[in-house]
Image (tube, rainbow, N blue to C red):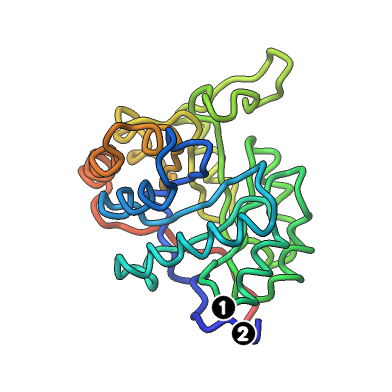
Amino acid sequence: MNNYPFASMRDCFDMSAYFVVGPQDCKGRPVTDVVDDALRGGATFIQLRAKNADAKDITEMARDIAQVIKNSGKSDSVAFVIDDRVDVVWQARDKGIKVDGVHIGQTDMEPQEARALLGEDAIVGLSAETESLVKLINELPSGCIDYIGAGPLHVSTTKPEASVGGNDGSGHTLDEEQINAICAASEFPVVVGGGVHADDMEMLARSKAAGWFVVSAIAGADDPEAATREMVTRWKAVRGDAKHGYAPRVK
């Protein structure tokens, strides 16, 4: 991206405290206020998910969130991605907005196409739910994606349809053994979410997960800063400041 003035975060992002948020999640509060609170509480990675907004509105939201990250002094340490909308990520980066990449699901644009459009500097994350699916993801070309988002840990109020193994009643949620199996099968760092709350931190920190992602536990909290800080503190009580590794890259 010739107009993109920021350094790539592909080899330095931190998924230990990954906050997913959109205007639908914030109880009528501005998204920027909630993101600001989460950053003060210790969030290390931000994803904007605005499923029903158009490209123009998502781009403007991205500009505002990028400014909040900058104002917090964390432009070099907190990665910012947009859910699903590779077109909006391309547009934002072309406009010089600090959007570090995209997170896509299994039914969104193919990861190879997302990488081709966004170039080698962008982060590309991909959702996966089962060990067998991870093994298929590992067959993607080297350097295509950077991390995997796995879930749900619990049945999620924001994505109640998501359950490991299918949506026909046979699905189930993840436990520590399953998380470790997914992480062991993956060549990529794995962040785990889906209904995550503070009481899950100890188990997740004991597991091989690179971190946790949340929506409602922060965005829906009366005090998003305090909610974030509690989860970060409880994670670090077990994991400390240890950081995950990174995906293989084509040099």
Expressed as whole percent of the image width and height from the top left, the position of residue 91 reads: 68, 69
Residue in view at x 58 percent, y 56 percent? 82
Question: Would you place residue 205 above or below residue 171 in this image?
Answer: below
Q: Are marks 2 and 1 in contact (CB under 8 Å)?
A: yes
Mark with earlier residue (2, 1): 2
Question: What is the quadrant of residue 181 in the picture?
Answer: top right
Which label belongs to residue 3? Answer: 2
Judging depth in this view, the residue of 180 and 63 nearest the camera is: 63
Question: Would you place residue 170 above or below residue 201 in this image?
Answer: above
Which label belongs to residue 96? Answer: 1
Name the element at disc 2. loop
Three-letter amino acid code at disc 2?
Asn
Expressed as whole percent of the image width and height from the top left, the position of residue 118 reads: 69, 71
Judging depth in this view, the residue of 250 and 60 nearest the camera is: 60
Three-letter amino acid code at disc 1?
Gly
Name the element at disc 1. loop
Real-space Cα distance between discs 2 and 1? 6 Å
Expressed as whole percent of the image width and height from the top left, the position of residue 127 reads: 63, 45
